[in-house]
Amino acid sequence: MRDSIIRCNFASKEDCLSPKPTLTNSSRQYLYMDDRRQMTMKDIARELGVSVATVSRALSDSPSISRERRQAIQQFAREHNYFPNVIAEQLRHSRRNPSRAIGVIVPELVHYYFSTILDGIESEASARGYHIIVAKSNESYDREVQICEAMLKNKVCGIIVSQAKNTERYDHFLHLEAAGVPLVFYDRICPALNASRVVVDDYMGTMNAVSHLLETGCKRVAFYGAPMNMEIAKNRFNGYRDAIYKHGLELDESLVRICDNRADAERITPAMMRMEGRPDAFFAVNDETAIGILSVIKRLGYSIPEEVSICGFTNGYRATVCEPMLTSVEQRGSQVGKEAADILIGLVEGTLARDRAEKRIVKTRLVLRGTTRHP
Amino acid sequence: MRDSIIRCNFASKEDCLSPKPTLTNSSRQYLYMDDRRQMTMKDIARELGVSVATVSRALSDSPSISRERRQAIQQFAREHNYFPNVIAEQLRHSRRNPSRAIGVIVPELVHYYFSTILDGIESEASARGYHIIVAKSNESYDREVQICEAMLKNKVCGIIVSQAKNTERYDHFLHLEAAGVPLVFYDRICPALNASRVVVDDYMGTMNAVSHLLETGCKRVAFYGAPMNMEIAKNRFNGYRDAIYKHGLELDESLVRICDNRADAERITPAMMRMEGRPDAFFAVNDETAIGILSVIKRLGYSIPEEVSICGFTNGYRATVCEPMLTSVEQRGSQVGKEAADILIGLVEGTLARDRAEKRIVKTRLVLRGTTRHP
DNA sequence: TAAATAAATGCAATCGTTTGCGTGATTCGA
DNA sequence: TCGAATCACGCAAACGATTGCATTTATTTA
């Protein structure tokens, strides 16, 4: 890290010569005290010759304080830019009131789908007066456990989490619930726990997408899916299967492959296209894989979408970059995030019962672009 | 929001039939109390017939507590899964010790570069025992001010921020510094404030990239830049200009355009290519713009990189999706994030002087791919 | 054996708020 | 003019931890 950066501490000369930013009147008032310490109720009380209790009540508009005093105190507070110490408030209320910090655990941060979910969570949370503490598990079980502990210590009011891939023990989650911290899962849910969750409608999303392919004239739709131990993989496959059946066709296993990344797609697609009865359409479990297919198909000289249609799943940045742009199933991560935050806040504020798992399914949306034919 | 989701609260039947997750021995211990309240020192003290002070000292391994008592107390605490209440700890120490929460303000969340920066900040922060509170300003000044206030209230120990585009007043930042909350800027720095900051080396990044184009045989390199009121725009242009000069060429203004998005790129590039003395290379201020150029060039039938080279800036997802893949200047957002966190923590912990702005420049890296020729 | 020293623990104040209860002053009705 | 009701406020105890100082007890020293 050290040698990859350039340090430049412009010392005195430039710094002193360049005009220092000046405080405007409205900001000068912030510098009232010994430069560090915040003003407290005690300060106000001392200054105004009343008790701290009176200050507290006056600031909370209690009717048991006389109008004049109340106004005097409020004005003094305003003028001296007093604001309450949340830490102390929280301590006082810890028995009754939860904090307003929501813990968010995300497997990765540099990831389109998770970014959109995080965005949704942040929007909903901040709109309702909460803030979010974000930690990434790096897909590590150990880190996930650590994070849960740290968040418990830091007194989050609840946690929104997508499990790490290799998480198979759930004590840390049970621990949290036992401590009264509600949990909401998104994306990768914990199958062993009957916890609240929000997921996208993988089944219908795939079903609709494949139906669209079939209804625009494709006869042999290939399916590139993820390994079947993941819930989403099963749901997407079922959607594919049922779309086939719904259109009166037979499931042809030679068209189904386990393949969820670009490299594999580029490797296996040429063989698929050499097959007798080659596919005339591909449905891929994510955009990355779809892009892999796309690049092979183009290289092989087929025209898209006339000879071969392709549909992805995610609708991330990638989908709009390739040529032609990719038709894809939009996962609406922002909506997923909003729903998750909505559930969590409901749980925290008591409008949702904690002993009942709230499960929501966000509908997907098929975004049609250049890799599929239009009806 | 309501009608875009499906709610399914599987009521009694399924839930009751499906096996409830059972608590293992190691987790049952968490359920020791009235199901909500955390164990406190007072509880331990009562249970063991000692004073709270003794418990506190025993748990902090004070030598003034006898060995047996210390061990007994520590064991009891361990067995009953006691852990300290950070809120109370913080309140007690508020005069001396800062919290371990770092506020991070980001203009957008669904954004490749910011994601990588956030990732870097998270990594560095968590490695050093801090957690991050994330808020997005949505490029709004008002929201930015709100967030600053909220973070001050929530007692973050410092803030890492990239300004909103339309932020032109800085009182909220001065306010923070006056309250003793150190600030570190990244990406979009505040020019009026002599604050700590970390930025990427736009100048050298561009200079190197353009030099590479020139050294692989290009003679007429076009430059698509952002409007010159932004600092980074200027730096990148200067890098371009100096690369040209360094190679003994003249700056040709007909090759320089203000253009920083795909739509504009697709609109103006055809005209560029019809010019007498058309460009044989393009340098674009970001990948998106470069992709726009790429798609036009391909449509016009030029071969890439033989007839036209293209280089972008960002090296995001996009760069690896297009055909051929895009040569681009990697901004190393993760490194930027790490440096920012490193500075902030230094400021908080006192290893860096607060009255001296720490400025770091992260070097870029040119990632060569298919849109440029190789030496 | 008494006094000095050392070791182990408790008391109580503190951090900044909130809040139940008590109390002195004012007002009211009779 | 007196008792009751009302009002406006203060006292003090929480919340859960830390810590200087006092206190108790055990041990050593003269």
Image (tube, coloured by chain):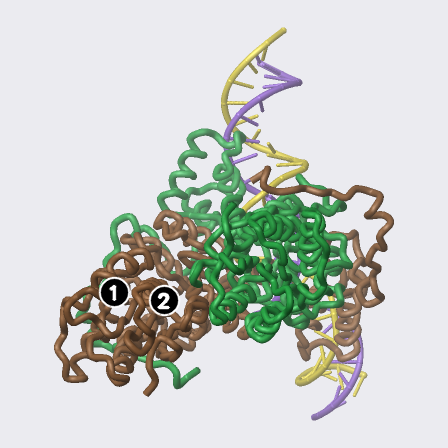
Chain colours: A green, B brown, C yellow, D purple
Q: Nearer the viewer, residue B142 or A319?
A: A319
Residue position marked by numbered label 2 in the rendering = B287
Residue B225 shows which numbered tag? 1
Count neighbours of disc 1 (C-alpha within 10 A) and say few if under 14, some if 14 to 19, many if 20 or more: many
Q: Quadrant of residue B186?
A: bottom left
Q: Quadrant of the C terminus of chain B?
A: bottom left
| Residue A240 x/y as whole percent | 67, 55
Q: Who's the residue at 22% across and 64% down the image?
A: A20
- Callout 1: SS: strand
Question: Can residue A100 be seen in the rendering of this structure?
Answer: no
Q: Is residue A115 above or below residue B123?
A: above
- Callout 2: SS: helix
Q: Who's the residue at 20% across and 75% down the image?
A: B220
| Residue B79 x/y as whole percent | 79, 68
Q: Nearer the viewer, residue A179 or B115?
A: B115
Determine whether, in the image, residue A103 is placed left or right of residue B261: right
Chain ID at mark 2: B
Q: Who's the residue at 42% across and 77% down the image?
A: B351
Determine whether, in the image, residue B366 is placed left or right of residue B193: right
